[in-house]
């Protein structure tokens, strides 16, 4: 097992796209604190050595999973699920048909009956209908904020409330859904837009390996095969446009959060988690 940390990247055998949100400059001359919040791709493929590094060396104590119920059930229990010291929270950023309990609050066999066609409806293949004049990726990101605002806020509130150790926010690739939640988190911490955009675009550095990893999973293989690598690659202008729209419509990401119930106290707690 090989494990090295280079700058903000966390290099583990079973992961492709994990990095630490610490060390980023803020508008008031400070920096975010390392070892508090990480962002990542799917954690299902962690090796035993990876788990040891995350839990014993980095101090991971919370997983905030942005995948759908279908993705979680299709992928099965990841190795961190068996550790009582690691809390798992689930906030799907895609609309789910029917009513679903937090998948981590109960065992899989205790979930309510899922409606016919649930796999097709819950995997991230839905064409967004919002802001049709925007590029597709921008439409997807605006869709998360429009359709699943309560899940976005819930994920941020969970990170802010963590009392110890490190939290990791992840989806499948750690790129789109994770990118939006992380962008809002960094904005609350006072990280300027250009640094938020640069963090988002870093996934392009590992996109070939990331697409290959997802293509090896039956859950994601079809999506990976239908489009070329370039179409999966995050572009800086995507996040630049999303942030610009939040500025225009809400006075910035923190304005959107205020309007959606994540007020001053919540933002202060999240900022403290990332800064103090």
Image (cartoon, rainbow, N blue to C red):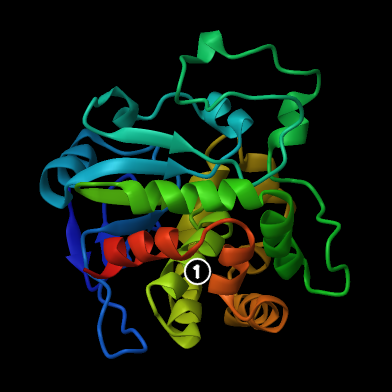
Instruction: Locate the C terminus and report the quarter of the image it occupies.
Output: bottom left
Residue visible at 72% across and 41% down in the picture: 95
Residue 150 showing in the rendered view: yes
In front of the other: 125 or 227: 125
For mark 1, give the secondary structure. helix
Question: Residue 4, image x and y in percent?
Answer: 17, 60
Check the image and name the residue furthest to the left.
57
Check the image and name the residue furthest to the top.
109
Q: Residues within 10 Å of mark 1 (few under 14, many from 20)?
A: many
Question: Residue 224, image x and y in percent?
Answer: 64, 50
In front of the other: 60 or 41: 60
Residue visible at 77% across and 66% down in the picture: 136
Residue 15 showing in the rendered view: no
Left or right of 213, for residue 229: right
Q: Which residue is mark 1?
A: 183
| Badge count | 1
Left or right of 103, for residue 186: left
Question: Residue 202, image x and y in percent?
Answer: 44, 73
Residue visible at 31% across and 84% down in the picture: 25
Residue visible at 72% across and 78% down in the picture: 249
Q: In which image quadrant can residue 92 be found? A: top right
Instruction: Locate the N terminus and report the quarter of the image it occupies.
Output: top left
In front of the other: 51 or 226: 51
Q: In which image quadrant can residue 80 be found? A: top left
In this view, 122 is above or below 209: above
In this view, 126 is above or below 87: below
In this view, 67 is above or below 75: below
Question: Residue 78, image x and y in percent?
Answer: 38, 30
């Amino acid at each position: 097992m090989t494990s090295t940390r280079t700058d903000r990247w966390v290099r583990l055998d079973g992961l492709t796209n994990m990095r630490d949100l610490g060390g980023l400059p803020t508008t008031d001359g400070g920096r975010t604190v390392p070892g508090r919040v990480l962002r990542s791709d799917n954690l299902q493929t962690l090796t035993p050595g990876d788990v040891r590094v995350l839990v014993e060396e980095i101090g991971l104590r919370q997983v905030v999973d942005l995948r759908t119920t279908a993705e979680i059930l299709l992928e099965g229990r990841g190795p961190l699920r068996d550790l009582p010291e690691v809390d798992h929270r689930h906030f799907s950023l895609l609309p789910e048909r029917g009513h679903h309990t937090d998948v981590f609050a109960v065992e899989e066999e205790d979930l309510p009956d899922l409606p016919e066609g649930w796999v097709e409806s819950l995997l991230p293949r839905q064409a967004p209908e919002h802001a049709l004049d925007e590029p597709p990726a921008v439409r997807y990101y605006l869709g998360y904020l429009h359709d699943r605002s309560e899940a976005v806020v819930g994920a941020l509130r969970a990170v802010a409330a963590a009392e110890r150790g490190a939290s990791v926010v992840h989806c499948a690739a750690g790129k789109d859904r994770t990118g939006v939640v992380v962008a809002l988190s960094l904005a609350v911490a006072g990280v300027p837009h250009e640094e938020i955009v640069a963090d988002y675009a870093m996934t392009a550095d590992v996109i070939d390996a990331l697409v290959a990893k997802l293509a090896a999973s039956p859950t994601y293989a079809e999506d990976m095969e239908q489009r070329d690598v370039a179409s999966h690659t995050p572009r800086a202008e995507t996040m630049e446009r999303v942030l610009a729209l939040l500025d225009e419509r809400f006075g910035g990401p923190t304005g959107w959060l205020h309007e959606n119930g994540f007020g001053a106290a919540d933002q202060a707690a999240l900022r403290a988690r990332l800064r103090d």
